[in-house]
Image (cartoon, coloured by chain):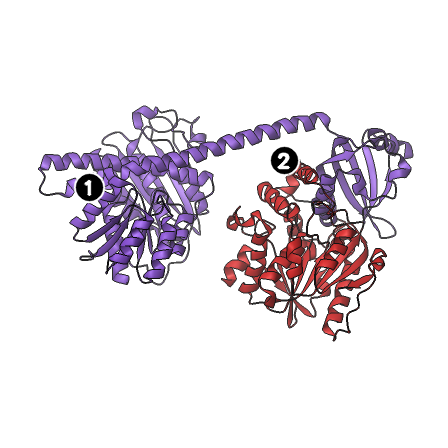
Amino acid sequence: MRDSISARNNVQICGQGARTMLFAHGFGCDQNMWRYITPAFEKDYRIVLFDYVGCGKSDVNAYHASRYGSLEGYARDVLDVCEALDLTDVIFVGHSVSSMIGVLAANQQPQRFSHLIMLGPSPCYVNDGDYIGGFEREDIMGLLDTMERNFLGWAQFLAPVAMKNSERPELAQELEESFCSTDPDIMRRFAEATFLADNRADLPKVRVPSLILQCTEDTIAPLCVGVYLQQHLPGSTLRVMNATGHCPHMSHPIETVQLMKEYLLAAATPAPPRVQQDLAAVTTAASTVSA
Amino acid sequence: MNDLWDHMPCGMVSFAGDGVILRVNDTLLAMTGHERAAITGQPFHVLLSKGGRIFYHTHLFPLLQMRGEVEEIYLSILTQSGAEIPMLMNARSRVTDSGATMHDAIFVRVRQRAQFETALLNERKKAQQANKAKDDFLATLSHELRTPLNPMLMLSTEMELDLTLPLAVRQQAGVIRSNAELEARLIDDLLDHTRITRGKIHLVESILNLHELLTLTEDITRIDSRTKRIELHFLKEATEHHMQGDSARLQQVFWNLVKNAIKFTPEEGAVHVRTHNSVEGKVSITVTDTGMGIHADTLPHIFEAFEQGSISKQQFGGLGLGLAITKSIVELHQGSIRAESPGLGQGASFTVEFNICPRPFQDAAPVQAAHDSGSLSLLLVEDHESTREVLARILRRCGHEVHAAATGAEALLLAQTVEHLDAVISDIGLPDQSGLDLMRELKVRRPSLPGIALSGYGMEQDLKDARSAGFSGHLVKPVSLDQLRSLLAQLTAAS
């Protein structure tokens, strides 16, 4: 079981420490996107990285369209990895769609998780009545069209490409060759499962405390979504970052690491009584709100 | 230099590592109608459609960040009025003197190319749909063709074995049986082909002794070669001949190659099968014949589906799928296959090559011959009337007591009334419920009752489903009497 899941999900383990941090990549990439973050935790934690089936260096033969047609299938991957390594008390770190995948996994087996750290999460990307997700259905169709055209023949997303990059010698050639390369059909289904998902009803069921890292000017997960999450996720803390964009772990790794460490440190020390703060505070950068 | 930047025949944008636009050129402003002041200082994604923004953040930005370079990215750029212009983007990162990361991007308008791509994508979708429809049709067709073969095969087998019938009648029954078997094999080829094209074949691997497998091939093909008075030689020269693989699938490969060699070799010709270790770590099996050979022009296409070289299908029969299936199976085993021929009339040779693995301490014990299982009380569930009757009759002739049901409901009723049952044999597709659900219900009532599933498909998923529903064995129709008897013997011996 352990070996087969490890191979299937390309599980990589490093670091040392009694507790485990499990890093789950977002839509479009693979575990390599964590390479600016994990070194900061290797000294104190056991780090587990993996690729979802169909992404990165996972075993593509294990891909079944029915299983991965919804985020539940991806949550199953997370739980499979936890079961195979017999993980408990896990700090789950998920980027983007992996935040909701983490929510689904934690709702199924809450005993395995101690904290959820979410980077740029959104429970629902499509606007729905009063709820502002930031997108209309046709925008998602536009994404699928853009993906399709980019997967049509431009090799870099499809096949390994040898890239020369003298300015970034720290990047292994192996990484550059495979990063983001993907199977178009799998990515299309992953895109649909991600951007047409609605996990709002799953939020109140969460029993694991969580940190929401919300970027400034994130068009994929706008601030109002972060606020919505904080209001509906029991035990959540919202931190609005100075970082802009949707990939703070790649564009602003130092701030990302710092906020994660602050949260974990606070979680490790006995918590003072939680205070409900004025939500207006959220609109200023790098502020904290606890629920 | 500024002139060059502004007047380049492509749009140019420089943006910071965090995505904020630092500089744009006149050409981009002219193409999009944006004011320089309105977009400078804004995040780069304001130039993109909303779908494009997601793509930028999930694919393009990470790629640029990690690789430092992207080429030929398709993006729709928004004009000031909100229209979308298809563009191709190349971008490269650099580190400025102050240590900050910058991305420089150029944009080329690709209106005509985008139209062409749209047409291409539409055509591709149509072709994919048509291809899927064809595969679905083939799968359904093969399934439908198999069902009526079942009673034909069973009845003829039964007649062939019936010593009370005159010899001539039994011989005629034998002709019917062998033709029904031939047809079943052709349909199997069709099914295999559709499974392979849908990526539905998964190997059941173990460590195999290739020489043992080839002995089986020798036994099966010996009769054909004798009939055509063809010399058939097996030279097992490889000293290392163990590999990791699926024995049934590899058997199919060798059988296909040797059968083909015999088929295309005229009477009194010769077929040689030789194993050797010419390359370290590899074992190859070469099948050489003195047959009609292959023309140099057709040699490259010989492994394509529905090809039989330039020869007429009427003359040799078959669907032309054998070599395509063979090649796919070989490649699933990380092996290679090649065909060589000096030309028409000069024979041909096919070589397959696999990676070897160390010989296990002890070769697996050969499959035990089927023991008969004495008299059993059996519940037979099959909705196809003639299949049910023939199966029941054959099983009764073997000395078993058979309780036959046509539906799941009937089967459950029988399971309640019949006091003792040794095994259940059930079709998967029943009119009122699936055989899988039936087995689950039966298991609740009689947990130790072994079951054999019968189905028209032999897909790996079917096998898995059958197992998880509680069946201990699975047979694909048309079922041969031998298979059924040996499985029954195994199951009832085990329980």
Q: Quadrant of residue B384?
A: top left
Type of amino acid under label 2: Gly
Query: Chain ID for label 1?
Result: B
Q: Quadrant of the C terminus of chain A?
A: bottom right
Q: Is residue A20 left or right of residue A243?
A: left
Left or right: B188, with B163 as reference point = right
Q: Secondary structure at mark 2?
A: loop
Q: Percent position (x, y) of residue B177?
A: 22, 37
Residue under pointer 2: A153
| Chain letter for the purple part | B
Residue B157 is tagged as 1
Mark 2 chain: A
Colour of chain A, in one word, is: red
Residue B320, given in percent of the width and then of the height, sits at 37, 31
Mark identifier at residue A142: none
Which residue is at the front of the view, B430 or B94?
B430
**Residue depicted at 38% across the width and 36% down the height:** B190
